[in-house]
Amino acid sequence: MTASRFTLTGLRPLEGMSAVPGEDLLGIWELTGPQVAAFAATAENMVPAEGAAAISLPPGAAEPGLIWRVELPASRREARSELEARLIAEKVRQAYLKAAEKRLSDLQLGLAYSAKTAGAESALLAEVMALRGSAVTYGAGDTGAISLLHLYEQCEALVARFRRLVQYYARVETSVGGQPVALTIVDWSGDHNVIWQEGIGPLDMALHMDSVRLVLATRQAWLRLISVVASGALSLSVKASVPGGQFLLFPAVYRFVRDVLAELDQVQANQEAPG
Amino acid sequence: MAESDLRLAIEKFAKDLAAKAESFVEDISTLEVRTFTIPSAEISTLAGGGLDLADPTLAQQLQLRAYTKIDFDCDTTICLPVDANDQVDRSVWDMHQTMVMQALRTRETMLKSMGTALTSALDALQRVAG
């Protein structure tokens, strides 16, 4: 029996970066770094990535770009249910993102410390106030300074990742029960090149089509995420009259969006919890 | 230091996005979908690396089974897959058509995203200017 994995290979951290967020903020994909691992993995040699030898590209070889790999279990019923769960999760995250955007645009600067202000809003407003009044100064080794620096690093890594997302559109590889079944390359003009395993059945075909849909929806959500953060930071900098605030506020708004997504996730988990 | 690094990263991102938007507008006049098949024993050789469809070695492995090109004015070119009896190969044709529908939806989404991105960029610029 093979477990399912949804991995994205090729989003590299910046050179010298120590603190790169390893997870997909939308919680759908496992980001596996620059290695060229295994669409080549077939039933007999398929092992979890942490145990798999990474294949280095030979010098001068063209970079493969971003590879979205969907590895599904041999049971078609389980495979379908795994994919459907991810597709639903992606839709839910899109809705959360929309909620975060709305809360960002509803933010009132005067409410900074009101008891009615939610935690994510309070933290963001405190950051805005600090930037506006330069009220906070950090000393070397200060926890606040380290935390802010860490957030800047995370944002920088995030933006660098999204640059690659812009440079490469999508290459989707689907395996079922350890056997590669199809590969689709979508380019920026929307052209599709699809390679099917000869004799592929309708069930596997549908699984690959859903994998492609999931990838395209994720790309969409990620680009939306960065657009929400960038336009939120810009709007807030204008509202708060922070010169150059669109850059200064980027990390704070990113943290706000991240916190709202986590908060809504928690609400959902509490609702689903038994009892 | 961290702020200037982040600023630089954002500027590079915006520049790349603008370049892609420009090439997208240039390339959007046609939509092409190609459906290939490959023997199951060979599909795993397509692992990871670059996939240049013009590569003759790759061309030997792949069999182009169906092709659709749709121009912006909806003029359409279609190459149908046929079997050994010159009959349309229904299974390949069905999967090709499904992919064409997918490609059309993708392009529609791309157009919407570009429109949304442009609207928010203009909106943000107006706020800054105003």
Image (cartoon, coloured by chain):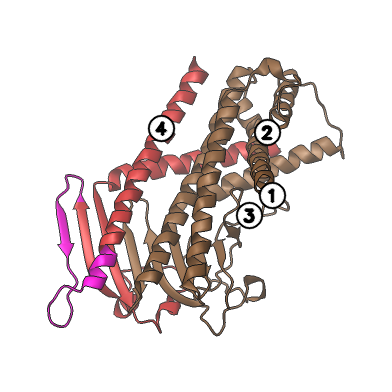
What residue is at 42 percent from the left and 74 percent from the top? A181
Question: The residue under label 4 is which amino acid type?
Answer: Leu
Tag of residue A273: 1
How far apart are labels 3 and 2 at the CA level? 21 Å
The residue identified by callout 4 is B118
Front position among marks 4 and 1 = 1
Q: Residue at x 63, y 76 (%)?
A: A52
Amino acid on which the number 3 mark rests in the picture: Pro
- The residue pinned by badge 2 equals A252
The residue mark sitting in front, 3 or 4, is: 4
Q: Earlier in the sequence, mark 3 or mark 2?
A: 3
Count residues near mark 2 (Cα–Cα under 10 Å), then give few for <14, some for 14-19, many for 20+.
many
Chain letter for the red part: B
Tell me how far mark 4 sits from mark 1, CA to CA.
Answer: 41 Å
Marked residue chain, label 4? B
User: In screen coordinates, is A275 left or right of A87?
Assistant: right
Measured Cα–Cα span from mark 3 to mark 4: 28 Å
Chain of the residue that carries numbered disc 2 in the rendered image: A
Report in which chain the residue with disc 1 lies. Answer: A
Q: Give the CA separation, mark 1 to mark 2.
A: 31 Å
Magenta stretch holds residue A44? no
Circles 4 and 2 on the same chain: no
Q: Amino acid at mark 2?
A: Ala
